[in-house]
Image: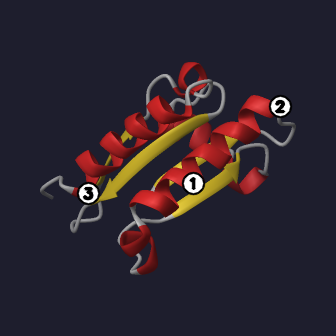
Amino acid sequence: MVYYFHGTLRCETCLLIETLAEGTLQADFPEELANGRLVWRPLSVDLPENAHFVKDFGLGANELVVIRQHKDGGATWGKVPDIWNLAANPGRFSQRLREEVVRFLEMRI
C-alpha cells in the first residue's frame, strides 16, 4: 500500500505531491494497481477515523508511507524521504517513489 497522509487544509505543494504520487503509480505500476497487489490511498489525518495514523507512523507534515503486509498479519513500512524537497523536481520525485515501491514489492515476507 502507498498512503499519502495529509490534512484537510491543503496548499499547492500538498496537492502537487498527491498528483505526482498518483501519476507515478498509475504510470509505473498499472498492473499492480489493477490486480490489487498495490493500493493507493490518500487519507486526511484530520478525520477522526484516520487520526491514529499520526501515532502509528510518527507522522509530521504530509507524508507518503509505503507498507508491505506480511502473511502473518504484521507489516513493514517506511516513509518516502524528502517528498517536500522533491516536489519541485517531478522526475526525481517519481524516481524516489518508484524506488521505494519496488523495494517493498520485492521484499520477502
**Mark 3 crowd level (few <14, some 14–19, many ≥20, 10 Å Cα):** some
Horizontally, is 102 left or right of 3 in the view?
A: left
Q: Is residue 62 left or right of residue 99?
A: right
Alpha-carbon span between mark 1 and mark 2: 18 Å
Q: What element carries label 2?
A: loop
The residue that disc 3 covers is: 105
Disc 2 marks which residue? 11
Give the crowd class for mark 2: few <14, some 14-19, many >=20 residues within 10 Å. Answer: few
* Label disc, if present, on residue 70 of the rendered structure: none
Q: Nearer the viewer, mark 3 or mark 1?
A: 1
Which percent across, then down, holds residue 95?
Answer: 39, 37
| Residue 107: image location, x then y, percent | 17, 52
Q: Quadrant of the C terminus?
A: bottom left
Identify residue type, mark 2.
Cys
Left or right of 44: which side holds 72? Answer: left
Measured from the top left, where is residue 18 in percent x and y? 65, 45
Q: Quadrant of the N terminus?
A: bottom left
Please, what secondary structure does the residue beneath circle 1 have?
helix
Q: Which residue is drawn at 46% across and 40% down?
A: 94
Residue type pointed to by label 1: Gly
The front one of 80 and 43 is 80
Q: Do the residues labelled 2 and 3 touch (CB within 8 Å)?
A: no
Considering the numbered disc 3 on the image, is that residue within a helix, a strand or a loop? helix
> Which residue is at 31% across, 41% downward?
99
Q: Is residue 52 visible?
A: no
Q: Residue 80: give x, y in percent of width and height.
A: 44, 34
Q: Does residue 86 appear in the picture of this structure?
A: yes
Residue occupied by mark 1: 23
Q: Camera-side residue: 44 or 34?
A: 34
Most distant residue in the top direction: 85
